[in-house]
Amino acid sequence: MSPEELALAKKWVETWNTTGPILEKIRREELRKLDTFKTISHLCGPIDFTQEPFRPKPTSGLVEQQKWFMKARNMDSFLQAAIDEAKKGLAAGGIPIGSVLVCDGKIIGRGHNQRVQHGSVIHHAEMNCLENAGRLKASVYEKCTLYSTLSPCPMCSGAALLYKIPRIIVGENQTFQGPEEYVRSQGVKVEILQNPDCIKLMRDFIAARPELWNEDIGV
């Protein structure tokens, strides 16, 4: 999803939460007013009695819309979990970058940049997240989505490629951009959201601690 699509999805989610049940109630009340033949036609579309019957389809696409809204809301909640991780890192004196690993709609790993806290040369947010997820089989990684508040660096991108994680959702790449095009060339779907909270976290941190940020990216 692009930032524009995500913003639109948020609006639809808010609208659905307040009006969706009302619309469904109205739809059911209207269907009760129709005679049997019209009800069947309304649910199934034009009827050809020479063909085998088929399952009714939802009217107005409400079921599909709700699935889309839930998907958008979940994406937003997973990114928020990564942002929460970033804030944990900042509160502990570290660099505010967070990451979560999602499989089958559930978070199975969380982490944030801990180079400062652990005196580590490798614990970027994504690496810390993968470490915290523990040993996983290839069949699990291939179903995962990796969320990160910032575009993954070459090291973290390499880890995602090594374990064949098929999708990476990036909070923003305005303050730093990793090898996104190379990652895409390897068949990974990389989506950039340009989330305002992610951008502000990094801009504020870089302005306050430029020397620490440069150390983190090897400058």
Image: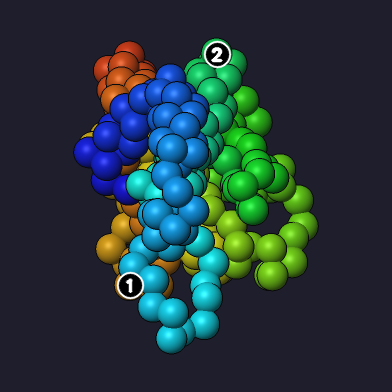
Q: Tell me if 116 is positioned left or right of 29 in this view.
A: right
Q: Is residue 119 left or right of residue 192?
A: right
Q: Is residue 185 something that shows in the picture?
A: yes
Residue at screen point 32% across, 58% down: 180
Q: Position of residue 212 (x, y in %)?
A: 40, 26
Q: In the image, residue 51 lies at what x, y percent?
A: 45, 84
Identify the residue shown where x is 64% and y is 53%.
104
Residue that lies at the very extreme toward the right in this rendered image: 135
Circle 2 packing at 10 Å, graded few (<14), some (14-19), many (20+), is: few
- The residue pinned by badge 1 equals 185
* Picture quadrant where residue 195 is located: top left
On residue 91, the disc is 2
Quarter that holds the C terminus:
top left
**Image vertical order of residue 17 relative to residue 46, above or below:** above
Secondary structure under tag 1 reads helix
Kindly indicate whether the residue at mark 2 contacts the one at mark 1 (C-beta within 8 angstroms).
no
Mark 1 or 2: the one toward you? 1
- Residue drawn at (33%, 72%) of the image: 185
Q: Relative to 56, say whether 89 is above or below.
A: above
Give the residue type at disc 1.
Answer: Ser
Left/right of residue 217 with respect to residue 175 in the rendered view:
right
* As drawn, 180 above or below 174: below
Q: Amino acid at mark 2?
A: Ala
**Residue 111 position within the rendered picture, expressed as x and y whole percent measured from the top left:** 61, 36
